[in-house]
């Protein structure tokens, strides 16, 4: 029997056999404490001592009665391997039944497979088989996944996700799913669509994507060696300098110089296996590059962080091919945005007033002009060498106001231009009102940051600072637009995800680029048929936040100069990407 007394709650569960270990007592305790607002104090500082002997005599008879019921219960573990937990409110005596997921990496009951060369081979075989089998985009709807995830991981006391909130402030109904982190913060997953049901589903999917990307929850990584040692053993390891490090970035001078991050060839790092799609072979990358929240697992990982990395290329899907495809589109989108910002390359303005074929985009435009009548709306094609279309959407106040937010932008990539336009517009309209409110509340601080680039550190800083009136002169997108095209000029027919992926594979092969896929799928995701991957294309510019975390390689600029046929001018101002 398991009894856990915590202030106004008593958690009760039952273990029938010694081998009945899935979701052990420690998992229940950790899940519950991780849902508390003061969890950082409770978990990390050992300020709460676990005990099963805290319950008062007054409650003991209730607990004994519950115990007797649980002894006869044949459903202590449900079909998702979650353990039944009863939560007793000591104030009201209300009893609630919930189901608790185990911690995949629990030392007592975890059963994660070891990350290995053979598993990476299997990943590649699955990928190749899927690539040769015609697949429709989103073969399983986000709404279906969202509903399954709500049933599986959403629970306020012991859930992986503890709450799902709906917002109606912006042009479209938004939803936010909160993923509680061990450091006391909540990581939001946000859904921004024209439908509340779909927004809730997307929010759940994004929160689970974050859950998968912070640390390994689908496999156990065991390789801990230096780069030189792995090379000497003949293991398939990437040269980290291909990833564009701060030390070989063109921006590593003057104000934007960054000496905080450095890779050392003879230093031991944790490594994780992935799959090189074009060379059809496994490959090793440092674990801190693939999982961006490992310091939540152990502070020892701080010494292994050799570059600033976030969720670039992380995406979910119905299978490995689908998730890696959407991750690849994100990598392309971010590279195109950054190269358009850091260089003076030409871009194309999209004329969207002729014919709109996508009814959802048409509705989005109507909503925008109704609710954002004070703003001009522009779309730009900022694509480079690849066939996936990257759309930049900007809104700018028609009459600038020194005390209000004047500008915001967002980008999206897709083979369907209207889909990309719609996603980029949704990205802006779903968060603009919230940012504008914060802009007005923190105007003095934001205005101060706008005059000193070295004060730009967080993701929000980037968007807020470029809302300032004084920053409008630094936004050059309209000046870079040297041509115009209509939506109808872009209409193409790609029958399946395979067609789109094959086109990108061939184009990236021609550019001598690698496409690396890393399986981040967690135990919980597999139960609903959901997959999560991180897709890496070494050499394309990664999205970073913070004035001196940018990484721009000489090779990438030379590729763009070859593509554009002229010398490009560089500027390393902090970008306005949200």
Image: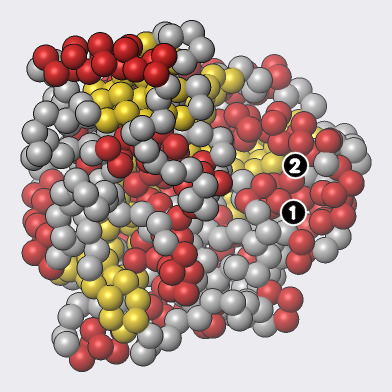
Numbered label attached to residue 440: none
Is the residue 405 above or below the residue 561 in the image? above
Which image quadrant for residue 102? top left
The residue singled out by tag 1 in the image is 475
Numbered label attached to residue 407: 2
Q: CA distance from mark 2 to mark 1?
A: 9 Å
Q: Could you say whether the residue bearing mark 2 is in a helix, strand or loop? A: strand
| Label tally | 2
Residue plotted at (76% across, 61% down): 455
Check the image and tell me how it is coloured: secondary structure
| Of the image marks 2 and 1, the number of the one nearer the N terminus | 2
Where residue 459 appears, as percent x and y from the top left, is 63, 51
Where residue 313 appears, as percent x and y from the top left, is 39, 53
Where residue 399 appears, as percent x and y from the top left, is 87, 34
- Left or right, 141 with reference to 10: left
Looking at the image, can residue 491 be seen? Answer: no
- Left or right, 345 with reference to 321: right
Residue plotted at (90% across, 38% down): 403
Given residues 19 and 278, the one toward you in this image is 19
Given residues 116 and 554, the one toward you in this image is 116
Looking at the image, can residue 90 be seen? Answer: yes
Which image quadrant for residue 59? top left
Residue plotted at (22% across, 68% down): 222
Dot 2 and dot 1 residues touching (CB under 8 Å):
yes
Is the residue 514 above or below the residue 128 in the image? below
Quadrant (top left/top right/bottom left/bottom right) for the N terminus? top left
Q: Could you say whether the residue bearing mark 1 is in a helix, strand or loop? A: loop
Say few, some or many: other residues with alpha carbon within 10 Å of mark 1 (under 14 / 14 to 19 / 20 or more): some
């Amino acid at each position: 029997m398991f009894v856990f007394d915590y202030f106004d709650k008593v958690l009760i569960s039952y273990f029938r056999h010694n081998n009945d270990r899935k979701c052990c007592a420690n998992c229940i305790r950790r899940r519950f404490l991780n849902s508390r607002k003061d969890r950082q104090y409770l978990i990390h500082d050992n300020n709460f001592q676990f005990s099963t002997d805290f319950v008062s005599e007054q409650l003991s008879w209730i607990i004994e009665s519950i115990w007797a019921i649980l002894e006869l219960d044949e459903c202590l573990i449900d079909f998702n391997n979650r353990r039944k937990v009863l939560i007793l409110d000591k104030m009201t005596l209300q009893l609630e039944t919930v189901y608790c997921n185990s911690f995949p990496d629990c030392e007592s009951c975890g059963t994660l497979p070891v990350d290995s060369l053979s598993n990476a081979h299997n990943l590649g075989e699955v990928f190749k088989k899927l690539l040769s089998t015609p697949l429709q985009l989103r073969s399983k709807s986000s709404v279906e996944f969202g509903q399954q995830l709500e049933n599986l991981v959403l629970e306020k006391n012991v859930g992986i996700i503890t709450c799902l909130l709906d917002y109606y402030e912006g042009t479209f109904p938004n939803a936010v799913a909160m993923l509680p982190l061990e450091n006391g913060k909540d990581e939001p997953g946000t859904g921004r669509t024209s439908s509340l049901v779909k927004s809730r589903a997307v929010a759940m999917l994004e929160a689970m994507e974050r859950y998968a990307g912070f640390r390994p929850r689908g496999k156990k990584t065991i390789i801990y060696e230096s780069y030189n040692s792995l090379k000497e053993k003949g293991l398939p390891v990437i040269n980290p300098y291909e990833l564009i490090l701060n030390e070989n970035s063109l921006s590593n001078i003057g104000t934007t110089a960054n000496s905080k991050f450095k890779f050392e060839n003879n230093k031991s790092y944790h490594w994780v296996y992935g799959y090189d799609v074009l060379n059809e072979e496994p490959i090793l990358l440092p674990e801190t590059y693939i999982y961006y929240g490992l310091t939540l697992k152990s502070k020892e990982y701080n010494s292994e962080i050799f570059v600033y990395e976030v969720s670039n290329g992380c995406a979910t899907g119905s299978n490995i091919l689908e998730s890696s495809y959407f991750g690849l589109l994100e990598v392309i989108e971010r590279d195109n945005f950054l190269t358009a910002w850091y260089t003076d390359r030409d871009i194309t303005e999209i004329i969207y007033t002729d014919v709109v074929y996508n009814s959802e985009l048409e509705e989005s435009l109507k909503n925008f002009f109704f609710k954002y009548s004070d703003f001009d709306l522009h779309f730009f094609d900022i694509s480079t060498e690849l066939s996936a279309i990257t759309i930049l959407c900007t809104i700018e106040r028609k009459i600038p106001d020194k005390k209000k937010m004047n500008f915001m932008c967002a980008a999206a990539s897709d083979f369907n231009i209207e889909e990309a336009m719609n996603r980029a517009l949704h990205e802006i309209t779903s968060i603009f009102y919230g940012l504008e409110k914060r802009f007005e509340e923190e105007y003095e601080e934001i205005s101060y940051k706008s005059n000193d680039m070295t004060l730009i550190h967080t993701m929000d800083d980037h968007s807020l600072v470029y809302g300032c009136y004084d920053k409008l002169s630094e936004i050059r997108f309209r000046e870079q637009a040297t041509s115009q095209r209509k939506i109808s000029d872009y209409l193409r027919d790609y029958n399946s995800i395979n067609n789109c992926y094959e086109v990108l594979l061939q184009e990236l092969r021609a550019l001598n680029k690698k496409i690396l896929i890393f399986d981040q799928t967690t135990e919980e995701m597999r139960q609903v048929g959901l997959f999560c991957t991180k897709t890496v294309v070494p050499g394309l510019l990664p999205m970073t936040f913070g004035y001196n975390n940018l990484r721009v390689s000489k090779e990438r600029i030379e590729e763009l100069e070859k593509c554009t046929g002229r010398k490009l001018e560089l500027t390393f101002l902090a970008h306005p990407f949200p």
